[in-house]
Amino acid sequence: MSSLARALKVLDLFGEETAVLGADEIIARLKYSRPTGYRYVRTLVGAGLLVRARGGYALGPRIIELDWIIRTQDPVLLASRQAVRGLVTATGCDVTQMGLYGERIVTIHHELGPRPLAIGYDRGRTMPLFRGAPSKAIVAFLPRARLERLYRRHGGRGFARFAEEMQAVRRAGYAVSFGELDVGKVGIGAPVFHGARVTGSVCLVLTRAQYDAADRGALVERLLASAARISEALEPVAPEPRPRRRMTASPRSTPRTPA
Amino acid sequence: MSSLARALKVLDLFGEETAVLGADEIIARLKYSRPTGYRYVRTLVGAGLLVRARGGYALGPRIIELDWIIRTQDPVLLASRQAVRGLVTATGCDVTQMGLYGERIVTIHHELGPRPLAIGYDRGRTMPLFRGAPSKAIVAFLPRARLERLYRRHGGRGFARFAEEMQAVRRAGYAVSFGELDVGKVGIGAPVFHGARVTGSVCLVLTRAQYDAADRGALVERLLASAARISEALEPVAPEPRPRRRMTASPRSTPRTPA
DNA sequence: GGTAAAAATATCACATTCTGAGATTTTGGA
DNA sequence: TCCAAAATCTCAGAATGTGATATTTTTACC
């Protein structure tokens, strides 16, 4: 394992319950020598990925900045703002958006409805890959081979059965789940495409009672329309003919405030 | 420069206008050899800090997750939610919160008022250190020595004059700025303390017209009360007595997986 | 303001691990 | 199916990372 990978493991020590870690604890957990541990930490602090905090080190401001960069440029978020707001108004439900990143499905936005549900769908939440409408609405539309690979790596047994369920979702064009993520809640998820491939999903979240009382057909229709609208807004992709010759990058480097 | 630092420079290439970078461009900009560039990128992708995207690489999902970790545990955000909401209701202004991280001041939250101002105060925005009420409300309360060091490193000339201004802010207990960040806007910032040290600020943002029409005394009073309330909620810090003896690390030497 | 403990860095010999030019394989779009 | 671009492999040389201990800097408390 490269020293870079070892150093980046430090970031993995931070978690839902672990905002601050002492240097000694980092060193102990990763079994690094004292100078090495401090060297890694120092470099990460230098890059802003960590900060010194009371009692040790915490995740740093660069992460907040980088998330801002992603957020402000994410084509899905940019293309979907209006559609999502409209969806909330039309349905009265909470709307969530998930993105597929490599082999992870992460919540990228949660637009609160008029009666927000007390559910932790914040941006940054990682979703189970094969459970819940948001994820199913994504993975169902992956190419067969890729789905199988993904499932075997993360899901485990019984792929045939799961593949059937996903085929049903694909035929329907959307996924519904009852209490798979939160008891008493219903999720309806629709895929978002970028060009020909799924890149995420848009989902309605509502209580079981709301679901039973609602005009479900209209709900689904609305959702699918919004998802389609988002996908269309994303369409303008790579219309540029591939350049024959590689362009030489301009030589000046990114200016940055000196440390 | 360590290889770790070199690899992390890749992250600095992404910016406000640069969501996706081709491998060749990364290599060209950083002047790395092809295998080295790809090695770095591969490792960063492995850590989730980058993802493969159409046309190259983009910032990865791990960043979104890490920001979530910061967001959900940030003691300031946790302690201030109520106070900030109250402040918005009471004043009708937008409220922003900034945090001091090492030598950076970063926006950590923007609570929209009833008539949201069209201003980019999103979480993740880095603020100039010595301009605008939010930053002044922070740096004015730094220990003298630290302020001077910070100023000379990032601010430049005329420290004496600046120090005087900051002293005035310190005496007043809050900072006001007129159009220093956005023309036509007024900012009023109050410091937030964690224990004895400044860790951030809470700020009201309003238009010049609103400011002129407002009961400014009441506005400031409200703001200071909220800032104090947040600081108090943060108080419970390190009540644990320091252990007398350092714990001995387990003596077995570092086992390491052979390559 | 001064003091002691803890946190963080410096030192330096050694060898692990990183580097880079070119060839090679894999990917993905028509 | 094919082709071009993207990404990885190989391997010798050497730069760079490593770790035990000593030293400096910071922090917190009086």
Image (cartoon, coloured by chain):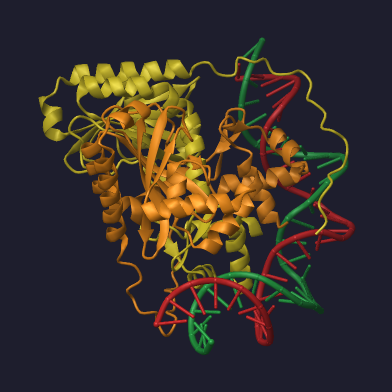
Chain colours: A orange, B yellow, C red, D green
**Position of A133 relative to B90 (above/below):** below
- Left or right: A136 as drawn, with respect to A23: left
Give how far across and how far down residue A207 sits, in percent. Answer: 36, 29
**Position of C30 relative to B240 (above/below):** below
Q: What's the residue at 21%, 40% (across, down)?
A: B179
**Position of A131 relative to D14 (above/below):** above
- Left or right: A122 as drawn, with respect to B48: left
**Position of A126 relative to B200 (above/below):** below
Q: What's the residue at 39%, 65% (across, down)?
A: A196
Q: What's the residue at 43%, 43% (across, down)?
A: A133
Of residue B79 and residue A111, the one placed in the foreground of this image is A111
Q: Kindly tell me whether residue B162 is visible in this rendering.
A: yes
Figure disc tally: 0
- Left or right: A200 as drawn, with respect to A219: right
Give how far across and how far down residue A231 sits, in percent. Answer: 31, 58
Q: Kindly tell me whether residue B2 is visible in this rendering.
A: no
Name the quarter where the N terminus of chain A is drawn: bottom right
Image quadrant in which you'd find residue B140: top left
Image quadrant in which you'd find residue A24: top right
Image quadrant in which you'd find residue C2: top right
Of residue A230 and residue A257, the one placed in the foreground of this image is A230
Q: What's the residue at 14%, 34% (across, down)?
A: B208
Of residue D7 and residue B44, the one placed in the foreground of this image is D7
Give how far across and how far down residue A113 sits, in percent. Answer: 28, 33
